[in-house]
Image (cartoon, grey):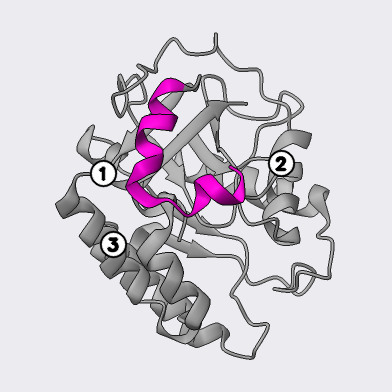
Amino acid sequence: MFFAPALLGLRSAGAAPAVLCCSAGNFYNQGEIRKKELEQSCCVLGIPASDVTVIDHRDLPDDPAVEWDTQLLATLVLKHIEAKNIDLVVTFDAGGVSGHANHISVYSAVRQCNAQSTEPGTALTAGTPLDCHWQNRLLPLPHVYLHSEGKLPEGCRVLVLESVNLCRKYISFLDVLISCLLPRDALFILTEEETEQAKRAMRCHRSQLLWFRQLYLLFSRYLVVNSLRLL
C-alpha cells in the first residue's frame, strides 16, 4: 500500500526485494484471504510468492488497539534478516505513515535493535533509486524491519519511509516537486506506467478496498513517490 515506489525502484536498480509482513491481517477474520491478496499484489510488482513471508503470531494480532511486543517482533525480524541474507531494510518511520499502532510498533522494534551501520548516505544518491552497494537481498515491506542494538548483520542498513502531513499525503504527483526540494537520503519516483502498475498491485487487496482506499488510489502520493531517511 505504501512501499510500491521503493519496491519498483529497487528492482529497477537490480536488487531482489523480499517482503516480510508482520501480521496476517486477521482483524476481520480474513487472514487467509489477505495473505493470498498480498502475494498477488507482490506478484504484480515483480516479487514472487517465494519471496513473500507473513508472520502470523498470536502475540502480534492485527489490531490497532494492541501494542505489539517490540522485543518479540525484533527477534522475529532479525531471524528473517539473517536467514535471507538481507542487507537493506525498508520500513515505517515513527509516524507509521497512517498512524496505525502496528506500523509504529514495527518502527519501535527496528529502532530497538540499533544497528551498527556504515556511514549514512554513502550508498545512496538523492534523486536516483540507489547506488547499489547492496549486493545480496533487500527487505522492503508493508509491516516490518529492524535496526538494533548492534544486532543487525554488519553492513545492513535501514531506510524509513517518511510520514507526511495530510495535505501532502493526498496531492498525488504534485508532491514530487516538494519531495525533490526537501532533504532525504533516498527518493523513488514512479513513471506514469509504473504508477499504474502500483495501482494494479493495490487493487489486488480486494478485501480492503473500502471507499476511502478508493480515494487513496486516486490521490495518495505513496503510489507515486517514496522519500526515505537512513535510520
Residue 100: image quadrant is bottom right
Compared to residue 75, the image places residue 182 above or below, namely: above
Q: CA distance from mark 1 to mark 2?
A: 24 Å
**What numbered label is drawn on residue 46?**
none
Q: Residue at x 32, y 26 (%)?
A: 135
Q: Residue at x 52, y 57 (%)?
A: 142
Q: Which residues are magenta?
A: 164-181
Q: Secondary structure at mark 3?
A: loop
Residue nearest the observer in this picture, 89 or 3: 3
Quadrant in which the N terminus appears: bottom left
Residue 211 image point, x, y percent: 49, 82
Residue 34 image point, x, y percent: 49, 80
Q: Secondary structure at mark 2?
A: loop
Q: Which residue is mark 1?
A: 190
Identity, as a three-letter code, of the amino acid under mark 3: Pro
Residue 209 image point, x, y percent: 45, 81
Query: Left or right of 162: which side holds 64?
Result: right
Residue 54 image point, x, y percent: 53, 66
Identity, as a three-letter code, of the amino acid under mark 2: Ala
- Neighbor class of circle 1 (other Cα within 10 Å; few <14, some 14-19, many 20+) is many
Identity, as a three-letter code, of the amino acid under mark 1: Leu
In reply to whether residue 175 is colored magenta, the answer given is yes
Q: Which residue is mark 3?
A: 48
Query: Left or right of 139: which side holds 196?
Result: left
Q: Which residue is mark 2?
A: 94
In reply to whether residue 178 is colored magenta, the answer given is yes
